[in-house]
C-alpha cells in the first residue's frame, strides 16, 4: 500500500510560525525561540502523517520563508549586496534576502505559478560562485529520522530552479540561465551524497515548470540534468514531481524518458489530458504518483470517483507501482478543519483541509489493497450526495439566470467615445481629472470600531456614527485637496472580497483557513459553496451617505466578479466560469441599485483579473473570454451617462491589453509606477485606446512621498503617448496601508502637478 504527500503547510494550524517569525523579526524573541516553534511544527506534521499511515512522508517542505529561497541558500547564490562572507547561511543573511535590511532592499518576489504563494526570485549570472551553503535538506531528513520517521527529502529540481530565476542586476537580460546547470549540479550531487549517507531511500525533485509551455532546448535541459545526476543518484529512488496543470505531451515524453528516475508525479485534478497521456503509454517498471487529492482547494475528495480512476491506472502501471498522492503540495490549502468550530456540520462534511486530505490519500491507498474502510467511504459518499442536492447549494433562479446569459455578448449599446461625451456633459470635469483608487488609511481606531461592531460590543447606532464620521473626514480631506472624483474611503471594509462575500449567499467563512501568501503573510479566502445571489444591496447605504456629503461626484466602489472568484476557494462541482457569471449577476444588481440611488460614477475593481490567467497559453483565450464577459455583464444595464471605472493592480498587462479594451469600461486606473512604464510602451507601439485611462502616477506600496516635479514628469511621459482628453491622474492603488502623514502630502503634490500641467495644455 503506498501513499504520498507532495508537501505540507508550514504555518501551523493556528499560524504559529507566523507569530514566531514576526516576534523574532521585531526583536521580541530569540533565534532559539523561533527554531523551537519551527521544530515543534515539523515534528507534529511528521507524526501526524506517520500516525495516519502515509508511506512517503515529505521532509524539507518546511521553510522559514520560501522553498525557492531555501534552494538559493543551499546553492550559496547570495547576491553580493548582502555581504555574505561564506559558511553556513544563517538567519541574518537569509532574512535579509527575503525582507531586506536597514541598508539593502529585499530580493524580488513573484507569484509561484498561478497560486497566491509568492517565491523569492533567484538572481543569477555568469559570476555567481555557487557553493553548498545550507544543509537544511539533510538536517531536516536527519531530524525526522531521529523521531522515527523515514521521510522523502524534497528539493526544488535544478532545471525548474534555473527556469524560475532571473539574470542578476548588471547581467545581460538575454543571459542563458540554463547554462548554469553545470555549475549547480555539483552542489546537488553533494546534497544527494549526504542524503544517501544519512539513509534516504527516496529523493523527490519538484519540477513543476514541466507543465508550462517550454521550448525544446528547455526540455533538453531536463534530459541533460538528470543524465548528469544519474550516477550520483544510483542506489536511491528518485521521484520527479510535477503539478498545477496538465502536462504537455512533449514534456510528458521528456519526463518519462529521464534516466535514473524511478517515479513520476502528476496533478490529476487539473485537466484530463495527463490521464490520457498515461493511458496512452507509461514506462514499464516505473512508479506513478497519482495526484488525485486536490492540494489547491478545500473540498472533500469524491473518494468513489478517485478510487475508480486509481483502479484504471492500476491496470496500466501495475499494482505495486501505483502510489496515491496529492495533486500538489498541500501548502496551497488550509491546514486543519478541526479548528473550524463556527462552520456548521453540513458544510464541514463537504470540506477537507490539509490534515483531512492526508487521511483521504491514505484511505484511497488502503482501499486499493482491499482494505477499504467502508464506514469512511460511505460517510464520504453521503456528504458528496448532500452537497449535490442541498438547497443551500442550489438556487434554481440563479442557475436559470446564469444559463440565460449564453449567446449574448452583453456590450453597452453606445461606443465608449460617445459615452464619455455624454458623461462629461453631466460631470463637467477638468482635463486631467484627479481621483484615488478607493481606500483611505485604515487607522487603529477604525479597525477597533469594526472589530467591536462585529463582536456586538458597540451598538448599530454607534457604529453607523463612527463610519459616517470617518467618511466625512475623508470627503472633506479630498475637497480640501481639490480632487475631482471622490471616494468614500472604504472604512466599513476589512477586505475587498470578504466584505462582499459576507453579504452574498453561497459564501462561507472560516476562522482559521489561512493559506501562506508570502513569508509570514497569510490570506483567508472565503469559500464559495453554492449558487451566488445578492439578497440585499451591499454598498448603496454607505455610497449614498457619502454622496450626500459632497457636491462632487462620489464613486460607488465594488469588487468585480473575476476578482471575487480568483481570491476565493471556488466550488469544484461546476466550471469556474459558471460561478463567475453568477457573481457577475449579483454585482450587476448592485451596480443598478447604485445608479438608481444617484451614483453617477461606479468603479468595479478587477485587481485579480490578470492573475487568474491559466498557466498554459492554449487556455488563455477561453479564460479571458469568460472573465471579460463577466465584467461586461455587471454594467451592461447602465445609462450612457453613468461612468464605469475599473481598476487593476500589477503592471504586466501588455499581453492582455486587447482583453482590457474588450472590458469596455469608460475609465481604467491601473498600476504603472513600479514597472518602468512598461504599460506605456503598449501605447507607444500604437495600440489604440479610446477609453479614459489613469496609469498610477506614484507607488503607494512605499512610504516615500513623491515630489510635484516627479509626478508632473510622469504625467508628461503619459501625455506623450496618450490623448490629453482620456488621461486621468491617480495613485497606483488604494491607500489603506499608508498613513495620513504620507497620503496628504503625496496627494497634495499630485493635485499641484496636475494644476500646473493644466495651465500649459
Ligand atoms: N478599491 C480598492 C482599494 O482602494 C482596490 C484595492 C486593490 O486594487 N487591491 O483598496
Ligand atoms: Zn490595486
Image (tube, rainbow, N blue to C red):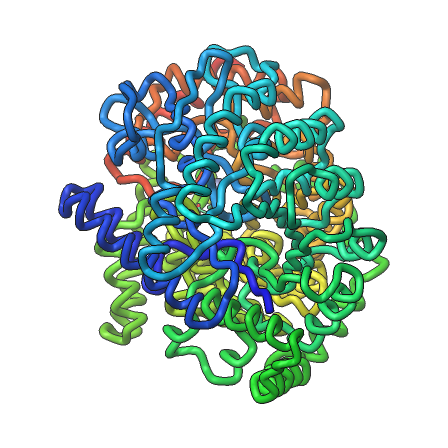
The total number of labels drawn is: 0
Against 491, is 713 above or below?
above
Quadrant of res 317: bottom right
Frontmost residue, 447 versus 553:
447
Q: As displayed, is residue 360 above or below residue 626?
A: below
Kindly identify the residue that appears in the image at 51 percent across and 28 percent down. Answer: 672
**Image position of 424 (left or right of 217):** left
- Percent position of residue 124, x then y: 48, 20
Q: Nearer the viewer, residue 486 or 646?
A: 646
Residue for point 61% across, 34% down: 230
In this picture, residue 433 sits left or right of residue 24: right
Against 171, residue 632 (above or below) is below
Between 466 and 304, the residue placed more toward the observer is: 304
Which quarter of the rendering shows the C terminus? top right
**Is residue 129 visible to the viewer in this orientation of the structure?**
yes
Residue 401: give x, y in percent of width and height: 74, 70
Residue at screen point 68% across, 37% down: 259
Image coordinates for residue 585, horizontal then vertical, percent: 66, 64
Say whether residue 271 is left or right of residue 82: right
Mark yes or no: residue 489 visible: no
In the picture, the quarter occupied by the N terminus is: bottom right
Which of 662/723 is in front?
Answer: 662
Can you give x and y, in whole percent of width and height, for residue 529 in the image? Answer: 58, 72
Look at 43% across and 64% down and name the residue there: 335
Q: Quadrant of residue 369?
A: bottom right
Amino acid at each position: 500500500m503506498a501513499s504520498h504527500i507532495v508537501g505540507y503547510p508550514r504555518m501551523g494550524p493556528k499560524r504559529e510560525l507566523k507569530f514566531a517569525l514576526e516576534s523574532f523579526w521585531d526583536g521580541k524573541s530569540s533565534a532559539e525561540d523561533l527554531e523551537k516553534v519551527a521544530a515543534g511544527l515539523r515534528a507534529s506534521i511528521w507524526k501526524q502523517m506517520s500516525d495516519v499511515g502515509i508511506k512517503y512522508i515529505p521532509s524539507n517542505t518546511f521553510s522559514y520563508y520560501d522553498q525557492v529561497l531555501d534552494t538559493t541558500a543551499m546553492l550559496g547564490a547570495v547576491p553580493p549586496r548582502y555581504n555574505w562572507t561564506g559558511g553556513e547561511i544563517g538567519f541574518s543573511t537569509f532574512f535579509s534576502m527575503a525582507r531586506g535590511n536597514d541598508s539593502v532592499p529585499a530580493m524580488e518576489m513573484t507569484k509561484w505559478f498561478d497560486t497566491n504563494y509568492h517565491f523569492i526570485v533567484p538572481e543569477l549570472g555568469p559570476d555567481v560562485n555557487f557553493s553548498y551553503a545550507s544543509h537544511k535538506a539533510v538536517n531536516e531528513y536527519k531530524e525526522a529520522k531521529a523521531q522515527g520517521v523515514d521521510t522523502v527529502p524534497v528539493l526544488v529540481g535544478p532545471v525548474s530552479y534555473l527556469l524560475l530565476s532571473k539574470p542578476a542586476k548588471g547581467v545581460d537580460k538575454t543571459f542563458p540561465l540554463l547554462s548554469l546547470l553545470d555549475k549547480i549540479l555539483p552542489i546537488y550531487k553533494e546534497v544527494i551524497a549526504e542524503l544517501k549517507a544519512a539513509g534516504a531511500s527516496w529523493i523527490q525533485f519538484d519540477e513543476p515548470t514541466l507543465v508550462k509551455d517550454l521550448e525544446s532546448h528547455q526540455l533538453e535541459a531536463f534530459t541533460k540534468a538528470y543524465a548528469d545526476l544519474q550516477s550520483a543518484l544510483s542506489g536511491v529512488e528518485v521521484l520527479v514531481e510535477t503539478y498545477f496543470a496538465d502536462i504537455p505531451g512533449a514534456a510528458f515524453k521528456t519526463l518519462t524518458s529521464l534516466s535514473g528516475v524511478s517515479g513520476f508525479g502528476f496533478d490529476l485534478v487539473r485537466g484530463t489530458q495527463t490521464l490520457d497521456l498515461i493511458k496512452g503509454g507509461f514506462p514499464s517498471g516505473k512508479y506513478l504518483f497519482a495526484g488525485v487529492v486536490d492540494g489547491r482547494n478545500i473540498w472533500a475528495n469524491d473518494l468513489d470517483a478517485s478510487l475508480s480512476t486509481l483502479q484504471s491506472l492500476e491496470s496500466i502501471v501495475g499494482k505495486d507501482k501505483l502510489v496515491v498522492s496529492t495533486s500538489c503540495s498541500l501548502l496551497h490549502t488550509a491546514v486543519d478543519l478541526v479548528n473550524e468550530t463556527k462552520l456548521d456540520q453540513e458544510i464541514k462534511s463537504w470540506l477537507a483541509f490539509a490534515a483531512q486530505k492526508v487521511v483521504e490519500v491514505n484511505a484511497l491507498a488502503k482501499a486499493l489493497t482491499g482494505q477499504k474502510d467502508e464506514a469512511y467511504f460511505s460517510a464520504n459518499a453521503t456528504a458528496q450526495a448532500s452537497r449535490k442536492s442541498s438547497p443551500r447549494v442550489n438556487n434554481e433562479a440563479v442557475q436559470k439566470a446564469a444559463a440565460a446569459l449564453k449567446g449574448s455578448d452583453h456590450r453597452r449599446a453606445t461606443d465608449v467615445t460617445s459615452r464619455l461625451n455624454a458623461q462629461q456633459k453631466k460631470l463637467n470635469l477638468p482635463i486631467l481629472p484627479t481621483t484615488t483608487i478607493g481606500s483611505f488609511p485604515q487607522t487603529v481606531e477604525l479597525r477597533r470600531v469594526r472589530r467591536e461592531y462585529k463582536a456586538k460590543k458597540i451598538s448599530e447606532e454607534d457604529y453607523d456614527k463612527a463610519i459616517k464620521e470617518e467618511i466625512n473626514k475623508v470627503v472633506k480631506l479630498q475637497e480640501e485637496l481639490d480632487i475631482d472624483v471622490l471616494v468614500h474611503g472604504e472604512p466599513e471594509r476589512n477586505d475587498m472580497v470578504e466584505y462582499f462575500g459576507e453579504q452574498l449567499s453561497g459564501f462561507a467563512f472560516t476562522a482559521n483557513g489561512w493559506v501562506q501568501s508570502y513569508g509570514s503573510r497569510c490570506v483567508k479566502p472565503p469559500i464559495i459553496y453554492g449558487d451566488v445571489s445578492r439578497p440585499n444591496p451591499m454598498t448603496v447605504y454607505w455610497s449614498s451617505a457619502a454622496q450626500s456629503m459632497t457636491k462632487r461626484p462620489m464613486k460607488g466602489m465594488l469588487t468585480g466578479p473575476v476578482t471575487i472568484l480568483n481570491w476565493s476557494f471556488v466550488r469544484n462541482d461546476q466550471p469556474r466560469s459558471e460561478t463567475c457569471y453568477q457573481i457577475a449577476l449579483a454585482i450587476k444588481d448592485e451596480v443598478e441599485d447604485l445608479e438608481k440611488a444617484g451614483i453617477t460614477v461606479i468603479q468595479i475593481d478587477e485587481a485579480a483579473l490578470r492573475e487568474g490567467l491559466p498557466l498554459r497559453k492554449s487556455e488563455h483565450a477561453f479564460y479571458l473570454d469568460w472573465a471579460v464577459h463577466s465584467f461586461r455583464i455587471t454594467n451592461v444595464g447602465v445609462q450612457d451617462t453613468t461612468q464605469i471605472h475599473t481598476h487593476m493592480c500589477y503592471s504586466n498587462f501588455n499581453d492582455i491589453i486587447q482583453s482590457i479594451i474588450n472590458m469596455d469600461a469608460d475609465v481604467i486606473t491601473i498600476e504603472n509606477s513600479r514597472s518602468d512604464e512598461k504599460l506605456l510602451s503598449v501605447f507607444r507601439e500604437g495600440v489604440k485606446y479610446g477609453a479614459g485611462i489613469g496609469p498610477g502616477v506614484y507607488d503607494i506600496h512605499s512610504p516615500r512621498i513623491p515630489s510635484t516635479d516627479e509626478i508632473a514628469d510622469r504625467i508628461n511621459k503619459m501625455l506623450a503617448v496618450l490623448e490629453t482628453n482620456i488621461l486621468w491622474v491617480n495613485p497606483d492603488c488604494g491607500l489603506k496601508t499608508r498613513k495620513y502623514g504620507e497620503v496628504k502630502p503625496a496627494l497634495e503634490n499630485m493635485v499641484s502637478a496636475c494644476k500646473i500641467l493644466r495651465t500649459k495644455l
